[in-house]
Amino acid sequence: MEGADEFMKYRSPLVSRYASKEMAYNFSDRKKFTTWRKLWIYLAKAEKALGLLITDAQILEMETHAEEIDFAMAAEEERKLRHDVMAHVHTYAHCCPTAAPIIHLGATSCYVGDNTDLIMLRDGFDILLPKLARVIDRLANFADKYAHLPTLGFTHYQPAQLTTVGKRACLWLQDLVMDMRNLQRARDDLRFRGVKGTTGTQASFLQLFQGDYNKVEELDRMVTEMAGFKKAYLVTGQTYSRKVDVDCLSNLASLGATVHKICTDIRLLANLKEIEEPFEKEQIGSSAMPYKRNPMRSERCCSLARHLVVLIADPLQTASVQWLERSLDDSANRRISLPESFLTADIILSTLQNITEGLVVYPKVIERHIRHELPFMATENIIMAMVKAGGNRQDCHEKIRVLSQEAAAVVKQEGGDNNLLARVQRDPYFAPILEQLDALLDPKTFIGCAPQQVARFLSEEVRPLLEPYKAKMDVKIELEL
């Protein structure tokens, strides 16, 4: 059956199941090898402009055949030569016989290999940044909408002072804002390896230009500009420093930690039935339990985020063992760790955008949880009101302590509701403040400056960060799986 052999070998689920087409293409063989050919064209153009004997016809021939890659021939050449770059030099030369003598002139393998990796890293960030911006935008809208809705705060996953649903979302947002700045900085810090030769000394190019150092420098500058970079690294070995990979992937790993925290929070809130991720009309939560609404999107994010976080170990160890001017034990590792980091981050952000576009809040459940805990939290307010009405603080404290213990026993030992308020109302001691009890127990008086913090944070730190991405904000995410 046509295509059946596709299912007879392992396929990475990062691509076959999850990743976007644009990120999958960014690390594809076609993108990689067409970029190699573009780099050979840039090199030839710059060398010709600086006086080497390269003709317009040779460059035109290279440009004409830049997209015509015979992958079968390249694979056969690599089997014979055991060298991927030379295999593609031969394959390109086969369809460019006139240009064959000047393809890859003066260059080493890392000219195409490393420079292409840097282009893919840059383009990968350019795919991720608008997606992260959209997640931040959706979550900012959510925070603004629920800035005033009181909810139980939790420390140690135990009920604590009230916050608001919007304020909690701002805790998530603050981490995402840090990630946004980090990814943008890592992207902007990327430079081109440029035209540096076999050990980074540019010796082959100095020979080509008969000792003219200025032409060597101009060659490096011209190719860097043609590739769309503002700067090249001034110092390299055969490769660019593998610390660059550490910088890129550490910021992606940090994003993974952020997303894991956010989605864990959503999973905890789903258990409380306060907030749920989107759930499709025909979606099945459990094969055995039809009533279940499992937070599978958040679980997917947590699962993939763990993978993203651990991938940082690869570039860290690779950078630490690059002997002298370079060692080839980086190559096989980087073929896996670089694409997988970007593919995983891409999947996570697409899924998180889908989650944040459809978060469902259940105010009545939130209110019930508040009512269950608020009487205990309001004891200090009750004491203060009694003191203002002429009571003794120590006496009042003891009265409240005893009633609180009795109410807690009902909750914990009998499984009943918190009846502290009813006990206070029945006790004649509290008669002077009975009319104030409703006001003393208004949840909105327990949320402090949360709404103001939300408004200021969104206006001062979130919205300005999103300005450059306004044109890309309307893209919605539909998850196929």
Image (cartoon, grey):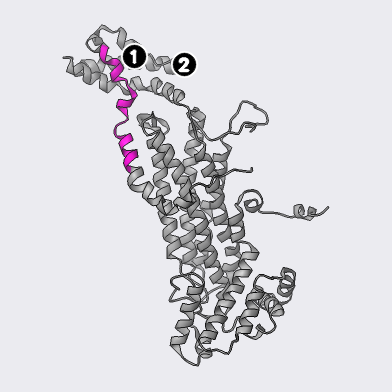
Which residue in the protein does label 2 denote?
Answer: 415
Whether the magenta-drawn stretch holds residue 304 is answered as no
Q: Earlier in the sequence, mark 1 or mark 2?
A: 2
Q: Quadrant of the C terminus?
A: top right
Q: Position of residue 228 (x, y in %)?
A: 49, 69
Tags 1 and 2 touching, CB below 8 Å: no
- Residue 214 vs residue 470, the one in the foreground: 470
* Inter-mark Cα distance, 1 to 2: 17 Å
* Residue drawn where x is 65% and y is 32% of the image: 282
Q: Residue furthest left?
A: 390
* Residue drawn where x is 54% and y is 84% of the image: 47
Marks counted in the figure total 2
Q: Please tell me whether the stretch drawn in magenta is mainly helix, strand or loop.
A: helix
* Residue drawn where x is 50% and y is 93% of the image: 210
Q: Position of residue 355 (x, y in %)?
A: 52, 40
Whether the magenta-drawn stretch holds residue 454 is answered as yes
Q: Which mark is residue 421?
A: 1
Q: Position of residue 112 (x, y in %)?
A: 58, 74
Magenta-tinted stretch: 435-456
Q: Check disc 1 and give the amino acid type.
A: Leu
Q: Position of residue 412 (x, y in %)?
A: 43, 18
Q: Check disc 2 and give the amino acid type.
A: Gly
